[in-house]
Structures are given as structure tokens and as C-alpha cells.
Image (cartoon, rainbow, N blue to C red):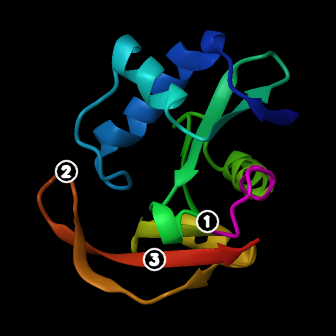
Amino acid sequence: MEITVRGYTPADEAAMIAIWNQVVEDGVAFPQEETLTAGTGKDFFAAQTHCGVAVDAAGDVVGMYILHPNNVGRCGHIANASYAVDRHRRCEHIGEKLVLDSLAEAKAHGFGLVQFNAVVASNLHARHLYERLGFVQLGTVPKGFRCKDGHFEDICPYYHML
């Protein structure tokens, strides 16, 4: 299936919100506990440095990412990103296309590296993808993520120089 990644438009927001909320509701990858609404989602996406969407041949949004500074001031050259793929379209290498696009966009927006603060240790598909694409794990934060069911998982920070 042909997948293209492009910058989002307001017409994509409903699909982006639905996909984002799937990951939040799963409670095993994103730190957020509150889902987005049409209003909060619009504001949330507009506040990012860049948002990208993965679109299939039929024009359906099947994945998305957000890109923004990881910090401010003297650390403002470090980007952070989050990725979400529709749960019915996972294992189709959509995440890889999103990550590659986000790296190019991060560089185009003047960032020098991308840092992920909280990759959940059990998210093996994401971790293997990041490592295959040249991300380096910085260590492990024991019990740094509280899953939806209340148990704690380690988190693994990663970075990638641009």
C-alpha cells in the first residue's frame, strides 16, 4: 500500500485526534491521560513546530506525528516528537515513514538533534525502529512510566543527531 507523509491541514484534525486518542486510551506508550477533543486537538496541533500525517492511496490519514522543542533556551535546538499509527494499520511500516519525515522536518526547522524522553521499555517495535534508524539509547529510567493498569515500566531515553 502506498503511504505518503505530508504536513497536516485542518481537514486532517479529526482523524489525527482519533488516532492520537487511540494511543492515549491504550495507556502503554504516551504519558498523556486525557484524550483530545475537537477544540483541544486543534489547539494542540497548532502549537507544535510541525505535524505530519501519513496518508494512504485512498487519502485516509493512517498515522501522524508532532514535532516541537524538547526544551527552551540553551536546549532549544533539541527536538522532541511523538508518533501514532491507527491501530488497524500497525505493522505496515507507517511508523518508519513518520520517523524519517520527522527527522527531515526537524533538520529543516533548525534543530540539531531529536531526543525522546520516555520510550516505554516494552514498546519493542518502536525501540527496534529507532535503533535501526540510528537513534542511540541514553540509559534506562527504572519504573519511569505508569501504565493504564497501574503497573510501572522502565523508560528508555533516545537521541539522534541530525
Q: Nearer the viewer, mark 3 or mark 2?
A: 3
Tell me the element at label 3.
Answer: strand
Instruction: Characterize the local packing of mark 1: few (<14), some (14-19) or many (20 or more) Cα atoms within 10 angstroms.
Output: some
Query: Going from the N terminus, do you reach mark 3 or mark 1 first?
Result: 1
- The residue that mark 3 highlights is 157
Estimate the spatial distance between the alpha carbons at disc 3 and disc 1, rounded to whole Å.
17 Å
- At x 54% / y 63%, what residue is drawn? 76
Q: Give the residue type that dot 3 points to.
A: Pro
Estimate the spatial distance between the alpha carbons at disc 3 and disc 2, rounded to whole Å.
20 Å
Residue 67 x/y as whole percent:
59, 47
Q: Is residue 52 left or right of residue 71?
A: right
Q: Is residue 29 above or below residue 64?
A: below
Q: Nearer the viewer, mark 1 or mark 2?
A: 1
- The residue that mark 2 highlights is 148
Residue 156 x/y as whole percent:
42, 78
Query: Going from the N terminus, do you reach mark 1 or mark 2 first?
Result: 1
Chain part drawn in magenta: 105-113
Q: Is residue 150 left or right of residue 111?
A: left
Query: Going from the N terminus, do you reach mark 3 or mark 2 first?
Result: 2
Q: Indicate whether residue 112 is drawn in magenta.
A: yes
Instruction: Characterize the local packing of mark 2: few (<14), some (14-19) or many (20 or more) Cα atoms within 10 angstroms.
Output: some
- At x 56% / y 72%, what residue is drawn? 127
Residue 128 x/y as whole percent:
62, 74
- The residue that mark 1 highlights is 77
- Marks 3 and 1: CB-CB under 8 Å? no
Q: Is residue 126 left or right of residue 156?
A: right
Instruction: Characterize the local packing of mark 3: few (<14), some (14-19) or many (20 or more) Cα atoms within 10 angstroms.
Output: some
Q: Give the residue type that dot 1 points to.
A: His
